[in-house]
């Protein structure tokens, strides 16, 4: 059977982030891709207007049905809008023999709308050790570290300690200032840097979703973690280059 991956994420009708983006990027890499929405949303390019989590029984039944239909080699986790939804997913992953899980923490939209209530944090603490990779930006890393009771002002120390404590690789994405475009991978006490070309002045919608989906597919295809990140960052750069601007002035990735 063809390799099969699953995206469990929020439905952003603009297609820039969330489920539509995840599925299109993964399908683009020629793997069979399943998708379950965790929430429906109303959004423009810049603004999240409304979020409604799906009933947890919907997630439970969908996972059960897909499990009977496919051997799922990888799962990409995006927006988790409620503790009930997060718990259902945790119960599934705890018992499913999925080779790879990439968890992209989604706490706030770029323009500040809260997409994940604090009640989910306790479940994230259990989901992170089940993951092959977690892909926070700087703000999300601080939040994840706080969940694990880690205190430091230095991002590198947070990344290293979180990786050690959770026994999970952590990719800190989207460095700032001179480091913009550079990502750092913390794996135990090892750190690896992935330079990238900064895209200045363009805040792309859903670039985190694209990167985590691409990394998941490459892991499932058998590439190492380092290779998967390197290849995915290269692909993301060409998606930036073919990007376009929406009517309300947000940048969307091109090439789909
Ligand atoms: N909506 C969904 C479903 C998302 O998953 C995300 C981010 O991952 C967003 C909206 C916010 O995207 P951005 O921060 O790029 O605006």
Image (cartoon, grey):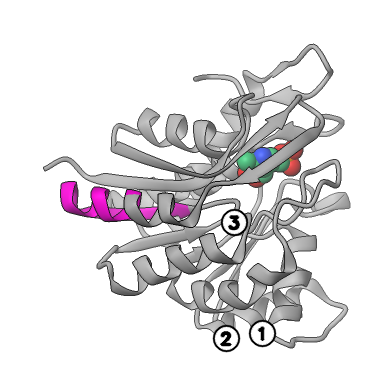
Instruction: Calculate the distance from the C-alpha at mark 1 to the C-alpha at mark 2.
Output: 5 Å
Apparent side of residue 17 relative to residue 61 in the rendered image (left or right):
right
Residue receiving disc 3: 80
Label 1 residue SS:
helix
Residue numbers of the magenta segment = 62-76
Residue 75 lies in the magenta-colored region: yes
Q: 222 or 115, which is in the foreground?
A: 115
Q: Residue at x 79, y 11 (%)?
A: 247
| Of the two numbered discs 1 and 3 in the rendering, the one whose residue sits closer to the viewer | 3
Q: 42 or 14, which is in the foreground?
A: 42
Above or below, comparing residue 27 to residue 129 in the picture: above
Q: Badges 1 and 3: C-beta atoms under 8 Å apart? A: no
In this orientation, does residue 32 appear?
Answer: yes
Label 2 residue SS:
helix
Apparent side of residue 12 relative to residue 167 in the rendered image (left or right):
right
Q: 20 or 54, which is in the foreground?
A: 54
Which residue, as the protein is rendered here, is positioned at the far left? 1
Residue receiving disc 1: 161
Above or below, comparing residue 69 to residue 128 in the picture: above
Q: Is mark 2 within 8 Å of ligand 1?
A: no
Residue receiving disc 2: 164
Dot placed on the residue nearer the N-terminal end, 2 or 3: 3
Q: Residues within 10 Å of mark 3 (few under 14, many from 20)?
A: many
């Amino acid at each position: 059977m063809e390799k099969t991956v699953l995206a469990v994420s929020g439905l952003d009708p603009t297609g820039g982030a969330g489920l539509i983006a995840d599925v299109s990027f993964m399908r683009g890499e020629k793997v069979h891709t399943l998708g379950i929405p965790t929430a429906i949303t109303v959004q423009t390019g810049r603004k999240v207007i409304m979020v409604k989590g799906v009933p947890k029984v919907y997630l439970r039944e969908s996972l059960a049905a897909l499990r009977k239909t496919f051997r799922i080699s990888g799962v990409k986790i995006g927006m988790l809008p409620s503790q009930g939804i997060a718990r259902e997913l945790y119960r599934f992953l705890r018992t499913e023999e999925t080779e790879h899980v990439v968890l992209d923490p989604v706490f706030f939209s770029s323009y500040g709308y809260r997409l994940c209530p604090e009640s989910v944090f306790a479940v994230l603490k259990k989901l992170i050790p089940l993951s092959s990779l977690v892909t926070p930006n700087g703000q999300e890393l601080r939040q994840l570290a706080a969940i694990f009771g880690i205190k430091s002002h230095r991002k590198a120390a947070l990344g290293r300690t979180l990786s050690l404590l959770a026994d999970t690789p952590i990719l800190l994405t989207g460095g700032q200032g001179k480091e913009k475009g550079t990502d750092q991978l913390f794996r135990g006490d090892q750190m690896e840097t992935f330079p990238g070309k900064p895209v200045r002045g363009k805040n792309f919608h859903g670039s985190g979703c694209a990167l985590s989906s691409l990394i998941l597919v490459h892991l499932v295809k058998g590439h190492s973690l380092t290779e998967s990140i390197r290849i995915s960052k290269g692909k993301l750069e060409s998606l930036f280059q073919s990007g376009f601007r929406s009517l309300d002035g947000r940048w969307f990735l091109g090439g789909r």
